[in-house]
Image (spheres, rainbow, N blue to C red):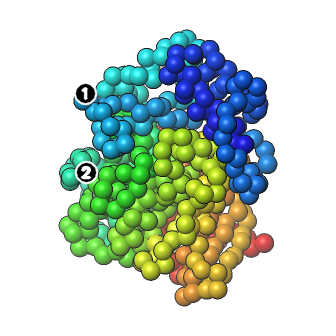
Amino acid sequence: MNNFLIAMRRATSLTRSFNLAEATRVIQDALASRPISGAHALTEPDISDAARAHHSKPFQIDPNAEIIEPETPQAAGATNPLEGVGFNRLRKPLGETLSILREGRAGAFASVPGLGPHKSIPELSAAVPSGARFLARSYACAAGIRSYKLYIPAPKQGEPRGLVVMLHGCKQGPDDFATGTGMNAVAEAHGLLVAYPQQTGKDNASSCWNWFRPSDQKRDAGEPSIIAGITAEIMAEFHLDRSRVFVAGLSAGGAMAAVMSETYPDLYSAVGIHSGLACGSANDVMSAFSVMRGDAPLKSDPKPRNRSTPEVRTIVFQGGADRTVHPLNAERIVAAAIPPEPTRTIQTHTGRSPGKRAYTRKIVTNAQGLPALEYWLVEGAGHAWFGGDARGSYTDQRGPDATNEMVRFFLEPGNASHENVAAE
């Protein structure tokens, strides 16, 4: 039985009935992987043996990992949550949630519009080299308005050669994400534009992209339509075609990048997903909670990509010790993106980053012999951008260099070699 999912449902029910002491006990038992028994047990359909076999040891969630609170009306008069209008999924660190329950601050789960003070990491001013520009812009469509930053490289190389759309993680913003990933410097070297759409505290309390909502997993709707609109606007302005347009992201941004590759394969030729989740792996609050932990049943696994659509080449980075997004989610992304078996070849390499982190790198080529999928699993790494700058948030300086590897994969589809990788 999926005890963790059952426990969270039980805790939610107890919180709504103001039985906070019992809700705290249920959550504590779940985090300690103690079974639900006796009067506290709930009746739930069992999951398959195959789903349980994905991981044999309990997954210990980081107490600072983001979780999703119950839905709260954004405006007076919103009455029907099934319509998905005027409602937000809200997040708080698990440790803070336990503290709230212990202290009896039930109002935190039924807060007013705006959900109290929105805490985020202070935005840095990303460095801009001479001749380059980092512009603040905004985009509006029927789904809403988002601001974004656009990095335009110095004109020494003529017109920009391509575009990378970068989707930040929770509690991040464009300047912080640009600083932490160092993407602007790499883009400058290759003559690339970089766009950084910004999620807002109004649309998600922790500025997370709403990757888990069905209304934000569709083409021509929700947040995907806004991100696609920003992409198309820049493509038209700089006369770019799909072959040089890419999307990437970290965590919730990685999950939304996966959504973009599925819903707009005609816009993006490649996607980079760092510590993210597969498109369609969650469809509500509870399934998001479950899939992040690695407990989602097989019925929620995404289907393989529709091969009748344009191929979107995929590169995935995942930390083996990630306690926010279980590594099983990277496997789901790979399973959905892998080319058909009769036409593919798989190479497996191992190596160590300059920071001494061991990694396994798998390269899957398509029928044309070009790399269609690349998967980096980094031992001992957590939930952070590999090889990032310590001045940005959620970065791991021990590498490997995810930014350079991502851009290399985007721009050189015929080159699967790497000087620091030794074949097994």
Residue 289 placement, left or right of 34: left
Q: Residue at x 71, y 70 (%)?
A: 349
> Identity of the amino acid at label 2?
Ala
Q: Position of residue 32 (x, y in %)?
A: 74, 30
User: Does residue 113 lie above or below 209 as drawn?
Assistant: above
Residue 379 placement, left or right of 208: right
Q: Position of residue 194 (x, y in %)?
A: 35, 59
How many marks the image carries: the answer is 2
Please report whichever mark, 1 or 2, sits nearer to the chain's N-terminal start: 1
Residue 112, quarter of the rendered image: top left
Q: Residue at x 43, y 17 (%)?
A: 107
How far apart, in angstroms, are the residues tagged by discs 1 and 2? Answer: 20 Å
- Residue 328 visible in the current orientation: yes
- Circle 2 packing at 10 Å, graded few (<14), some (14-19), many (20+), is some
- Circle 1 packing at 10 Å, graded few (<14), some (14-19), many (20+), is few
- Foreground: disc 1 or disc 2: 1
Residue 346 placement, left or right of 193: right
Q: Position of residue 15 (x, y in %)?
A: 53, 21
- Residue 330 visible in the current orientation: no
Residue 41, quarter of the rendered image: top right
> Identity of the amino acid at label 1?
Ala
Q: Residue at x 46, y 31 (%)?
A: 70
Q: Secondary structure at mark 1?
A: loop
The tag on residue 310 is: none
The tag on residue 76 is: 1
Residue 135 placement, left or right of 103: left
Q: Are marks 1 and 2 in contact (CB under 8 Å)?
A: no
Extreme residue in the top direction: 103
User: Does residue 103 lie above or below 70 as drawn?
Assistant: above
Q: Which residue is mark 2?
A: 143
